[in-house]
Amino acid sequence: MTKIKMCGLSSENDIQAANEIMPDYIGFVFAGKSKRFVSAEKAGRLKKILNPGISAVGVFVDESTETVAKLLKNGIIDIAQLHGNESDEYIRILRTLTNKLLFQAFRIRTADDVIKAEKSIADYVLLDAGAGDGIVFDWSLLKNIKRPFFLAGGLNCENAVSAVRTLHPFALDVSSGIETDGKKDKIKMAAFAAAVRKEDYR
C-alpha cells in the first residue's frame, strides 16, 4: 500500500478534513519563509485535534537540532523532515537527542542527486523538484533507486495514479496539488487519497 502524506496543513479545517480522509501522515511546515508556516504553538493546538492514527511530520529548513528535538519530545510532532542543507553530522547529533523517525529531503535534478539520496543516513528520504514549489521533476531519474522513498513535487489527483504505477514509491507527498487559491481543499484532498487507494487495490 502506498502511503499518503498531506503537507502544509495549517488550520482546524485542514485537520478536520484529514481526520475524515485519514492520510498516513500530515505535515506542519516550520520554515519561516513558507506561506504554509505554522508556529510551534499553533501546531501544538492542531496536533491535539489530529486523529492519533495520523502521524504529524514537522518540516524544517536548517533549524537547530535542539529546536527540532524539543518539538518531538513535546509531542507536537511525531517525525522530523529535514528540508535544508542538513549534513550527516547534523542527523547524528539529532539522533542523540531523539529516537523518533527522521526524513531527509533531496532536490532531484540529476542522477547524482539520486545517488546522494540513497546514501542518506536518515530513516527515509523524500525526493522533490524543489522547495515546495509544485513542480514535477524527471521521474526517469529514479528508475534504479533501491531504497524506499517519499515522492514529492507537483503531485495532484491527475498524476497520482501514474506515480504509483510507474515508481511504486513508499509514499506520495502532496501539498499544492490539494489546494485551491492557496488553501487546502477538502474535495481535492479526498480525491487524491481515493486515487492512490484505488490504484493500490487494482
Image (cartoon, rainbow, N blue to C red):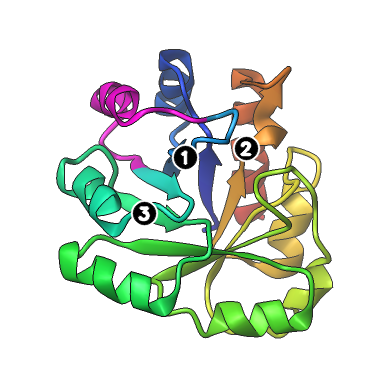
Q: Residue at x 64, y 85 (%)?
A: 115
Question: Please, what is the three-letter code of the amino acid marked with disc 2?
Answer: Ser
Q: Which residue is mark 2?
A: 175
Who comes first in sequence, dot 1 or dot 2?
1
Vertical arrangement, residue 136 with respect to residue 96, above or below? above
Q: Residue at x 19, y 41 (%)?
A: 75
Q: Which residue is mark 3?
A: 80
Instruction: Tell me whether the residue at label 3 lies in contact with that at label 1, contact meaning CB atoms closer than 8 angstroms.
Output: no
Separation of disc 1 and disc 2 at Cα? 12 Å
Assign a secondary structure to mark 2.
Answer: loop
Image coordinates of residue 50 in percent, x first then y, are 31, 28
Question: Please, what is the three-letter code of the amino acid marked with disc 3?
Answer: Ala
Q: Which residue is mark 1?
A: 23
Q: Residue 184: name its quadrant.
A: top right
Q: Is residue 159 magenta?
A: no
Q: Nearer the viewer, residue 87 or 26?
A: 87
Given the current orientation, which residue lies at the most extreme top position? 13
In the image, which is nearer the foreground, mark 3 or mark 2?
3
Question: Please, what is the three-letter code of the amino acid marked with disc 1?
Answer: Pro
Dot 2: within a 10 Å radius of its alpha carbon, few (fewer than 14), some, or many (20 or more) residues? Answer: many
Separation of disc 3 and disc 2 at Cα? 17 Å
In the image, which is nearer the foreground, mark 3 or mark 1?
3
Dot 1: within a 10 Å radius of its alpha carbon, few (fewer than 14), some, or many (20 or more) residues? Answer: many
Q: Residue at x 53, y 34 (%)?
A: 8
Instruction: Tell me whether the residue at label 3 lies in contact with that at label 2, contact meaning CB atoms closer than 8 angstroms.
Output: no
The magenta stretch is: 37-55
Specify whether residue 187 is in view: yes
Q: How many marks?
A: 3
Specify whether residue 24 is in view: no
Separation of disc 3 and disc 1 at Cα? 17 Å
In the image, which is nearer the foreground, mark 1 or mark 2?
2
